[in-house]
Image: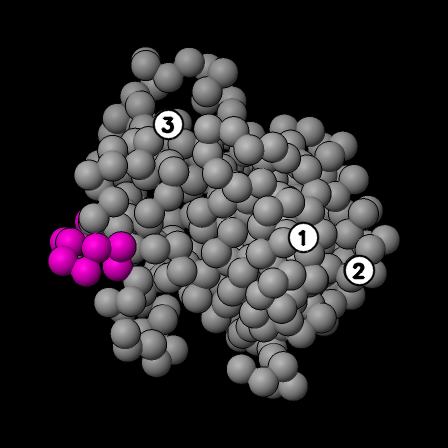
């Protein structure tokens, strides 16, 4: 794409949990369009999983964007405030917030330590409110701001709560925040939407939960990155309060080749949680 026609040129995008997986893919997709990416995550050193905020920042720069790697702990309000202040000092604006970071434990309440429950409620639901709270004053000035939360469509079917009530509550809380903030912020031309994958996405979390053999049933994070790009480049006065599913959204935008997203060309795709056939 010609940089003159770039929709995100010089736009400043904060992506939490962007040191690997879906967050990293979103950072690189937006960087290819000339965005300035705040790579915000806990990973400052290589650990059990590959990728740090610094390695992704280098990838962002190689892809054509600017990068600001910032360590963040979403359990600490102070680190979020520092992130916002440093972003404003460095780039002078904030146009998009993508709340991608989160925690997962697909366990019944009886088998879920309250420390884990607190972690999911904090990193999933509360983090959306925390990051949004401090970004909103700056998003108002953007004139076309976006908040994107990675959370599922709402359903009252109890099967989606069965055996993992705490996790589902935390994710549904993110979606409820999406709907509420959309109403609160529409007068400021800030679009607030949610995005969820139709199929399993290849990530460390998926491998941890389902094992290596599940990878052949996955799509790559690139499909979520493309879907996120379509949302944050939309007119926020027209696209807000929506709970998007990646494939459905991309088909509505004219995407036709979905084979390119498959990890295993011969694999049979598995549906993600909260998705009906």
Disc number lying in front (3 or 2):
2
Picture quadrant where residue 53 is located: top right
Q: Is residue 208 left or right of residue 234?
A: left
Figure check: 107 above or below 102: above
* Residue placed furthest toward the right: 89
Mark pair 3, 1: CA separation: 27 Å
Instruction: Identify the residue at horizontal 24%, vertical 67% (top origin).
Output: 259
Residue located at (77% from left, 40% from top): 81
Label 1, secondary structure: give it. Answer: strand
Identify which residue, 63 or 105, lies in the foreground: 63
| First to last magenta residue range | 262-270
Q: Residue 105 — which label?
A: 3
Say how many tags the image has: 3
Distance (Cα) linking label 2 and label 1? 10 Å
Residue 52 image point, x, y percent = 58, 40
Q: Foreground residue, 276 or 198?
A: 198
Name the residue beneath numbered marker 2. Answer: 91
Residue 236 visible to the viewer = no
The x and y percentages for residue 163 are 26, 26
Above or below, 75 relative to 110: below
Give the Cα separation between the discs numbered 3 and 2. 36 Å
Q: Earlier in the sequence, mark 2 or mark 1?
A: 1
Which of the two discs, 3 and 2, labels the residue nearer the N terminus? 2
Give yes or no for contact between labels 3 and 1 (Cβ–Cβ under 8 Å): no
Q: Is residue 113 left or right of residue 212?
A: right
The answer to whether residue 85 is left or right of residue 147 is right
Residue 96 location in percent, x, y? 64, 60
Asked whether the beta carbons under mark 2 and mark 1 sit within 8 Å of each other, the answer is yes
Which part of the image, by quadrant, shows the C terminus? bottom left
Assess disc 1: are there few (<14), some (14-19) or many (≥20) residues with their C-alpha within 10 Å of its C-alpha.
many
């Amino acid at each position: 794409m010609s940089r003159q026609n770039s929709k995100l040129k010089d736009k400043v995008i904060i992506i939490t949990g962007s040191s690997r997986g879906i967050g990293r893919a979103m950072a690189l997709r937006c960087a290819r369009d000339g965005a300035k990416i705040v790579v915000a995550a806990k990973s400052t050193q290589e650990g059990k999983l590959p990728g740090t905020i610094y390695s992704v920042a280098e990838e962002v720069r190689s892809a054509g964007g600017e990068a600001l790697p910032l360590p963040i702990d979403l359990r600490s309000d102070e680190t979020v405030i520092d992130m916002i202040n440093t972003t404003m000092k460095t780039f002078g604006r904030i146009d998009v917030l993508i709340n991608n970071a989160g925690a997962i434990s697909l366990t019944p309440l009886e088998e879920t330590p309250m420390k884990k429950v607190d972690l999911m409620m904090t990193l999933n639901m509360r983090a959306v409110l925390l990051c949004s709270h401090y970004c909103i004053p700056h998003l108002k000035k953007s004139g076309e701001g976006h908040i994107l939360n990675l959370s599922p469509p709402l359903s009252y079917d109890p099967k989606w709560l069965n055996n993992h009530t705490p996790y589902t509550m935390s994710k549904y809380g993110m979606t409820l925040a999406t709907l509420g903030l959309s109403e609160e912020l529409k007068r400021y031309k800030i679009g607030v939407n949610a995005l969820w994958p139709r199929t399993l996405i290849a990530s460390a979390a998926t491998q941890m939960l389902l094992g290596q053999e599940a990878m052949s049933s996955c799509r790559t994070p690139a499909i979520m990155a493309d879907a996120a790009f379509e949302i944050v480049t939309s007119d926020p006065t027209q696209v807000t309060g929506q709970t998007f599913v990646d494939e459905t959204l991309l088909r509505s935008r004219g995407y036709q080749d979905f084979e390119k997203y498959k990890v295993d060309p011969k694999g049979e795709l598995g549906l993600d949680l909260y998705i009906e056939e």
